[in-house]
Image (cartoon, rainbow, N blue to C red):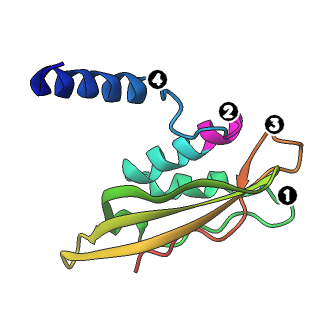
Amino acid sequence: MEPFTMRYLLLAMTLLSTACMTNRFGEVPDPLGYRVRAFENVVRWGALEKMYAFTKPNPGKPVEIPAGLGNVRVTSYEMANPLAKITPTRWTQTAVIDYVLTDRQIVRQLIDQQFWVSDDEGKSWYRENPMPQFR
């Protein structure tokens, strides 16, 4: 085979192999993948007060949403480390969030280490650790 043809064959094989990867979460349970993707969309699109809907409900203690979230504009949300299993009902991932404090036009970045937990064998998932602090 000519070198030129071989390059096209290798390129085609590479493209076909990556096209077969449809689930970016790999072997992650579907409910967890959907939940994490929903959280990402909430943060990415700037509805930061809705992040607190991803915490475990506690009827005795209402969720306190911090003031000042309206002053934050998220400019980027990227996964630094994809979801990784700790146990079958506890997973972790790390995201890098870039944002701007709009009243001062200050650009900031935070590393958000997330822990996702299920108490019902993977049917529903919630974020176990505190939400990121946009300061």
First in residue order: circle 4 vs circle 1: 4
Q: Secondary structure at mark 1?
A: loop
Residue situated in front as seen by the camera: 84 or 19: 19
First in residue order: circle 1 vs circle 2: 2
Write the residue at 45% across / 72% down: 111
- Can you tell which of label 4 and label 1 is closer to the viewer? 4
Predominant secondary structure in magenta?
helix
For the C terminus, give its image quadrant: bottom left
Question: Would residue 119 be found to the left or right of residue 112 on screen?
Answer: right
**Disc 3 and disc 4 in contact, CB within 8 angstroms:** no
Residue 20: which disc?
A: 4
Give the crowd class for mark 4: few <14, some 14-19, many >=20 residues within 10 Å: few
Residue 59: which disc?
A: 1
Residue 76 painted magenta? no
| On screen, residue 78 above or below 133 | above
| On screen, residue 125 above or below 87 | above
For disc 2, the marked residue is 30
Write the residue at 74% across / 47% down: 125
- Can you tell which of label 3 and label 4 is closer to the viewer? 4
- Can you tell which of label 2 and label 4 is closer to the viewer? 4
Q: CA distance from mark 3 to mark 4?
A: 27 Å
Image location of residue 49, percent across then percent down: 51, 57
First in residue order: circle 2 vs circle 3: 2
Give the crowd class for mark 2: few <14, some 14-19, many >=20 residues within 10 Å: some
- Amino acid under disc 3: Lys
Q: CA distance from mark 1 to mark 2?
A: 27 Å
Image location of residue 82, percent across then percent down: 53, 53
Q: CA distance from mark 4 to mark 1?
A: 44 Å
For disc 3, the marked residue is 123
First to last magenta residue range: 28-35
Q: CA distance from mark 2 to mark 4?
A: 18 Å
